[in-house]
Amino acid sequence: MKPTPKLLSTIILTSLMGSSAIGLADETVSSEDIAGSPLDVGVMTVVGVLPDNLESVSGSYQIIDSEYLEDRRPLSIKETLHTVPGLNVVPDGSMSFDLNLGIRGLNPRRSSKAMIMEDGMPLQLAPYVDPVNHFAPHPAIIDRVEVIKGAGQILHGPQTLGGAVNFITRPVPRNGEVEGSVTSSFGNQSYRFLHGNVGWGNDIGGIMLDATQRRGDGIFRGAEYDIKEYRIKGELDITDRQTVMMKYTYTDDDRNQTEDYLTRDEYAQNKFRHRTAKFDRFEQERHSVQLKHLFDVNDQFRLTSQAYYNDIFRQGTRYSRAGNVVDDGNGNLVSTYQSCNGLRRQVALTDEDPANCGARLAPRQYYTWGAETRADFAHNLFGLENETIAGLRYHEDTAVRKESWARTRAEVRDFNAAYEENLFGRNSHWTLRARAISYYAQNTTFVGDWAITPGFRVERLRSSFDDNLNNTRTSRSQTEFLPSFGVAWSGIDNTTVFAGVHKGLSPARANRESIGVSAKPEKSTMYELGLRSNYLTGVYFEATLFHARNKDTLADDDGDFFNIGKSERTGIEIASRINFGDIMGTANNFYISGAWTHVPYAKYKDDAFDIDGDPITNRGNRLEYAPRNLVNLDFGYEHISGVDARIGLQHVGKQMPDSLNRREEDATGRRGIIPSYTVWNATVNYRVPNSGVTLFASVENLFDKEYLVSRNSGKLPGRERLFLGGITYDF
């Protein structure tokens, strides 16, 4: 399905005159409610994807607000998201810059089965052809986070198997004064963080500048990182009912980070030393532009449009090769160099400068753009109150993936020379493309205390794969219809009982044909039954039962994708917070908050065949990286003087890293159980009265526990204890 020029021009024109992802209730929402979209906080405009009327949402969702982010002082998105029930964030070799998010037992590898957005714009490198995530905004620039796991996620695709996460950046100030903040913090492991933002606006419009720098050491010693982010946001009220918004983001990401981790023997010798970490490198440069147009046609009808464009270049340089082990001469089985002395993956890693050894080079260029229009309107069809959301999005992906092997350190610095040499005859040059049109609609009918919400999403996709070295092309078209249905009952004050079901989708990668395997998209049916309540003063409680049936489950075999049969997941999510200050009517507050995810059943239902066509005995095996239990628990105290403190724990249950559930550890470190672990953390803040100054200190892994977090490419340890202290000045 190739859109005609007329259709393309219509979509783009509509997007510049309409609207994208906004709620529709006309009621005024206070800043404490946090949930309307767009939401006026004072005169600032905050744009989210959840509706204003949260009681009618017929599915599970969570909101992480700015107050929590300020109190918790999370180092990264990992610490931000692990408080949400149902979410498993697996660390990487740095500071969780490569977001690995699994929702309700889905594989977390690079968040490829979750929908990740910033201000409603897709964040994955290429959502259809390569939906991996090598970027997440720092918590300091986030105003709030919305997590949608129920039937409502069909409004946000293409990944609709498990849930959608939307990071909402800070709003532009509009009160006629210059506003901003400066934050500086530092800690051990060479940790340095600097963030500043300044903005000004009035009742006509405004502008804001934001800059962030993160520096420090990764998990392995010598694996340094330096990441800079710059944003400029602006908005202008062109009429009383229309607002135009613009955001430009530039990211410069430079890390000495390996993606191949440790063998069994290397881990036993020193789990925080990797022989090539100081030579391996990951570089990423991102340019992102987003335009939005908000149009309140009248009090009952709102249009929102967005157009976005991303230009992303990333280059990975790896000297080591996970999965290949040789004897280092001392009886230890260690990883090999990618290439050394003309040999491919045969020479053992050493601590010496690998001047005569080369690396695998993988430069990749991504271009994505899209345009979306969404209408939110109220009507009285059949004499009943209704709220409808209907939208259309056009999206294009282009990914250019090259790969080559360098012979020496000098050749590593010159990809063209390495590519021309074509060492081992292993060069590759692929171009992956996708064009997709998505249609979606959802209507909520209110009948007394009931809200009934049917909906659907249609994905029409054409993807192609070009092997530029062999001058071959394969392509595929697909159309998927994804219905949803939900119901919510709010017959008790501040309480909602909800149930829902929806079909989900994860498109197959466009390079599937290159290996002679015709992979199908992974599809699911998700059922939910839940309750959320703030009925008792000072007590919030929510619980959700879920069951999901997936077919054609997509598996990744070292970058090749194939279907591995049916799978099922069943579990319960519980979250609660108790504020004893509200219960006792005191100005000071002691609180307990927690989240528990229990997934007793997460298994494959079929045997299957691997990428080579060999049979795999999967039936009854547990899904990869699907712990039975995830627990987050915080104990905190907030004093009227401006002091607040908390101590918390995070527990992650035992995990299986491969579909065969091989329990015995092998020499590569890639097989074997990942044991459960519990780590503690703490934060203290002091807001100096009448000064705008906040002093803070935080510690992650309080008791310096040693634990294993991943076996994806060998054994990866959890981060050592990290202390930090800092100051924020708000003006």
Image (spheres, grey):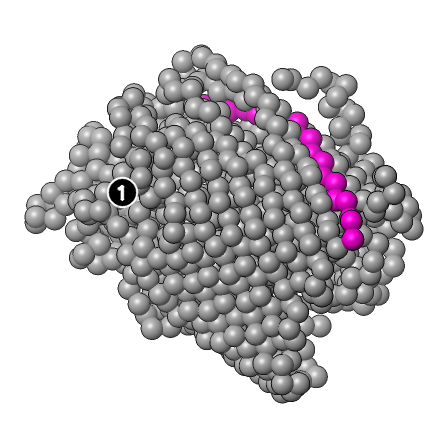
Q: Quadrant of the C terminus?
A: bottom right
Circle 1 crowding by C-alpha within 10 Å: few under 14, some 14–19, many from 20: some
Q: Quadrant of the N terminus?
A: top right
Depth check, front residue: 632 or 679: 632
Q: Which residue is mark 1?
A: 661
Q: What's the magenta bit mostly, secondary-structure-wise?
A: strand
Query: In the displayed image of the protein, which residue is found farthest to the top?
Result: 471
Circle 1: residue type: Asn
Residue 437 location (% of width, % of height): 66, 27
Residue 342 location (% of width, % of height): 20, 29
- Residue at 77% from the left image edge and 45% from the top image edge: 445
Residue 338 location (% of width, % of height): 26, 36
One can see residue 656 in this view: yes
Q: Is residue 160 magenta?
A: no
- Rendered view: 553 above or below 94: above
**Which segment is the magenta one?**
430-448
- Rendered view: 323 above or below 585: above
When asked about the image quadrant of residue 666, the answer is top left
When asked about the image quadrant of residue 143, the answer is bottom right
